[in-house]
Image (tube, rainbow, N blue to C red):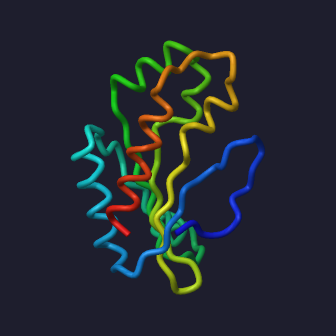
């Protein structure tokens, strides 16, 4: 199930987002496991809520899970170093309006932003994996 209206600055959609009825920490844990099962590595988990609270702001639960596959990142960066601004890939788990969501940026957007750069099938491959992970943890 797609949620909301993704902002579109190009012909591609920015994110794939699903709603989940599962417990927040359970979703986060399963995202981390599925990332590893799909040949990626969890680089870091940002606890946005904690960071905001440490700065004196109230914020709902929100975690950003950075993921990377070194081979794919290597190939993409060799093709265009500027794409490093959009990697590593991320899957976000957050609460909004009492509901929980799992969301990931769609890497095919990179191909739209850099149409002259040959990225091969990497954006499609990674996007398939991100959607698979999100669908499996919802």
For the point 63% across and 38% down, which residue is it? Answer: 109
Task: Give the image location of residue 110, x and y in percent.
Answer: 61, 33
Which is nearer the eye, 49 or 63? 63
Residue 12: which quarter of the image? Answer: top right
Which is nearer the eye, 53 or 6? 6
Q: Is residue 24 left or right of residue 103?
A: left
The total number of labels drawn is 0
Residue extending furthest toward the right: 9
Task: Give the image location of residue 77, x and y in percent.
Answer: 50, 19
For the point 45% across and 65% down, which residue is it? Answer: 93
Q: Is residue 93 depicted above or below 119 in this figure?
A: below
Q: Is residue 57 left or right of residue 93?
A: right
For the point 68% across and 32% down, which residue is it? Answer: 112
Which is nearer the eye, 135 or 56? 135
Which is nearer the eye, 122 or 27? 122
Task: Give the image location of residue 28, x and y in percent.
Answer: 33, 65
Residue 10: which quarter of the image? Answer: top right
Q: Is residue 36 depicted above or below 46 in this figure?
A: above
For the point 60% across and 69% down, which residue is it? Answer: 3
């Amino acid at each position: 199930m797609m949620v909301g209206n993704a902002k579109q600055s190009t012909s591609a959609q920015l994110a794939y987002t699903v709603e989940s009825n599962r417990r927040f920490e359970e979703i986060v844990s399963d995202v981390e496991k599925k990332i590893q099962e799909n040949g990626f590595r969890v680089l870091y988990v940002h606890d946005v809520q904690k960071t905001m609270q440490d700065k004196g702001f109230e914020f709902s639960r929100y975690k950003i899970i950075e993921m990377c596959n070194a081979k794919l990142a290597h190939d993409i960066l060799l093709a265009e170093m500027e794409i490093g601004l959009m990697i590593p890939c991320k899957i976000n788990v957050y609460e909004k309006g009492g509901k929980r969501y799992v969301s990931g940026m769609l890497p095919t957007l990179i191909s739209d932003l850099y149409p002259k750069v040959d990225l091969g099938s990497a954006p499609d491959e990674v996007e398939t994996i991100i959607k698979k992970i999100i669908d499996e943890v919802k």
